Image: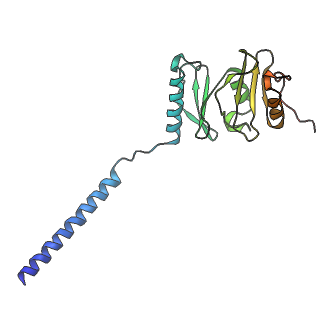
Amino acid sequence: MTGQQGRSGAVARAARGLVALAAGLTCMALLAPVAAASPIGDADNAMTAAWKDAGGDTSDLGAKQGEAYAAGAGFAQDFAHGKMFFTPATGPRLMMGAILDKYESLGGPAASDLGFPTANEVRGLAGPESRVSTFSASDKPLIYWTADHGAFVVRGAINAAWDKLGSSGGALGVPTSDETYDG
């Protein structure tokens, strides 16, 4: 009988030890810092990497001005000569000068119906003095700029027809006004 009591006592002590060990591990897991990504952190990392790849302070954007911040359904980062915008769907995209001014005058990422830029602002087909940026709205808008005419939005069916005709390098040339609705 004493042998049986000794064994059951040892089993009980072992069980208590396992319970204590499990409780200790649970406490450690609950108190351990959790490494988690944040949307603004991911946006900042993506925009910083794109900026560094473009040349950092010596890029067309120049030096960073402050931190990344929420902008509409995505994020933005200010630079000395422009801005970069980010959503997970579009990635980091840069804009500068008159195209950025036009975008912001229409409400930018928070209040315009253009959406976020889908490509970096680049030279247009009309030559080195032209620029274009495309946007994520369903009608695939763009803002086109030339020094002679300024920055204008082209979208939807007009954009599709203009594109088929060679866009700014075609017969119609560059936009000279925003499109308007005439009933």
Compared across the picture, whether 24 is left or right of 43 comes to left
The residue drawn where x is 74% and y is 42% is: 138
The residue drawn where x is 28% and y is 62% is: 23
The residue lying furthest to the left in this view is: 2
Relative to 3, does residue 17 appear above or below in the rendering?
above
Count of labels in the image: 0
Compared across the picture, whether 86 is left or right of 12 comes to right
- Quadrant in the picture for residue 156: top right
Identify which residue, 183 or 174, lies in the foreground: 174
At which x and y percent is residue 145?
Answer: 75, 21
Residue 104, visible in the rendered structure: no
Relative to 182, does residue 7 appear above or below in the rendering?
below
Compared across the picture, whether 63 is left or right of 18 comes to right
Looking at the rendering, in which quadrant would you find the C terminus? Answer: top right
The residue drawn where x is 52% and y is 18% is: 57
- Quadrant in the picture for residue 75: top right
Name the image colouring: rainbow
At which x and y percent is residue 106?
Answer: 74, 32
At which x and y percent is residue 180?
Answer: 87, 33
At which x and y percent is residue 96?
Answer: 65, 22
The residue drawn where x is 51% and y is 21% is: 56
